[in-house]
Amino acid sequence: MTLSLSGLTITVRADGTDRVLVADLSLEVEESRTIAVVGESGSGKSITALSVLGLLTSWYAASAFSVSGLLRIDGEPEYRLDLATARDVDFDAIRGRAVSMIFQDPWTALNPIRTVGRQLVESVRAHSTVTATEARTRAIDLLERVGIQQPAERYDSYPHQLSGGQLQRIMIAMALAGRPRFLIADEPTTALDVTVQRGILQLLDELRADGLGILLITHDLSVVAHHSDRIAVMYGGAIVESGRSRAVIADPRHPYTRLLISSVPTLDVEPGSRLVTKADVLAGRSIDPRLGRFDPEQRTDVELVRIADDHVVSRRFVGGLR
């Protein structure tokens, strides 16, 4: 089973001008695999994820955003959506059933005046025809599945009575209520401390082992190395390098990928030394002489260079080729 996104282009109208945010992007998420999309803030990661579920072109945002491309989910049943013409009623067929999403801030995603159990029951009943008693049983089972201690008691808790890690687990439980095939996780550990992050990531690994395909959006390259099968590096609304996670991290070829990796602090950094920054690169510092330097003004060269069978690099945003 595969979720594939091809030719995704997202524009936004501001002050009478259309600005391209994502240009001709394609990616695939396979069953029982995690693909991580990494890049700095503003690179287009989250709006790409939102477009999969039609959340950029819902009624409240339709006047600002324009989305085109093709979304396909194979299997039984098969879904095929033209993102330029699809409307909310078309996305309703896949939301929660084929694809679910968890957001980076569970405090704002949950209703503060309703118990978490009531909100979870709403998700269960939205995707299946069950009685109130059956929905409650299913909700408690989901809480137990995602590692909530004393799930029957937590069922009656309000969001403010729970920790950030517990709330994120509840968000994952809500996402699983419709038994989806794919899960989009948008920075699911951003607001959590390191110990709680580990627990959430281990839970996502368990879900992947159970057959779920996961699209993981993150800034954390250590997460990518240990909790994803593939990586897609994104900058300026384009994927500039993709391949197996360990292969890309071990041998990054695009200057921007090398920049990201070079900016991560390591234990062998000399005290008092500076990390590489984008300002260094824009000033002319070459990260990889095999490709040239990172040049955000160079947006037209879309040639792909195949480094290996499963490792592709784009010439986009590369200047000073030798």
Image: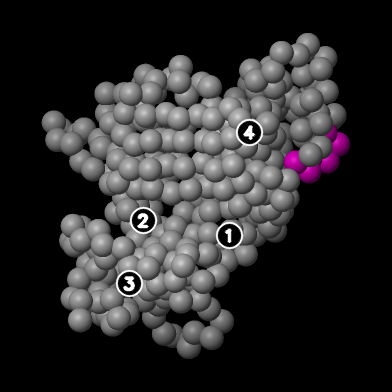
**Residue receiving disc 4:** 180
Tell me where the magenta segment starts and ends, as one range. 146-151
N-terminal of the pair, mark 2 or mark 1, is 1
Amino acid under disc 4: Pro
The residue located at (34%, 61%) in the rendering is 240
N-terminal of the pair, mark 3 or mark 1, is 1
Q: How many marks?
A: 4
Horizontal side of residue 200 vs 59, given as left or right: right
Which of pointers 4 and 3 indicates the residue nearer the eye? 4
The local secondary structure at tag 4 comes to: loop
Q: Residue 239 carries which label?
A: 2
The residue located at (39%, 20%) in the rendering is 87
Q: Are the residues at dot 2 and dot 1 in contact (C-beta closer than 8 Å)?
A: no
The residue located at (33%, 43%) in the rendering is 7
**Residue receiving disc 3:** 255
Amino acid under disc 1: Asp
Residue 294 pos. (x, y %) = 26, 70
Mark 4 to mark 1: distance in Å? 20 Å
Amino acid under disc 2: Ile
Q: Does the magenta stretch include residue 147?
A: yes
Q: In which quarter of the image is residue 137?
A: top right
Q: Nearer the viewer, residue 41 or 249?
A: 249
N-terminal of the pair, mark 4 or mark 3, is 4
Q: Is residue 113 visible?
A: yes
N-terminal of the pair, mark 4 or mark 1, is 4
Identify whether 196 is placed above or below 85. below
The local secondary structure at tag 3 comes to: helix
N-terminal of the pair, mark 4 or mark 2, is 4
Badge 2 density bin: few <14, some 14–19, many ≥20, Cα 10 Å: many
Horizontal side of residue 140 vs 73, given as left or right: right
Which of pointers 3 and 2 indicates the residue nearer the eye? 2
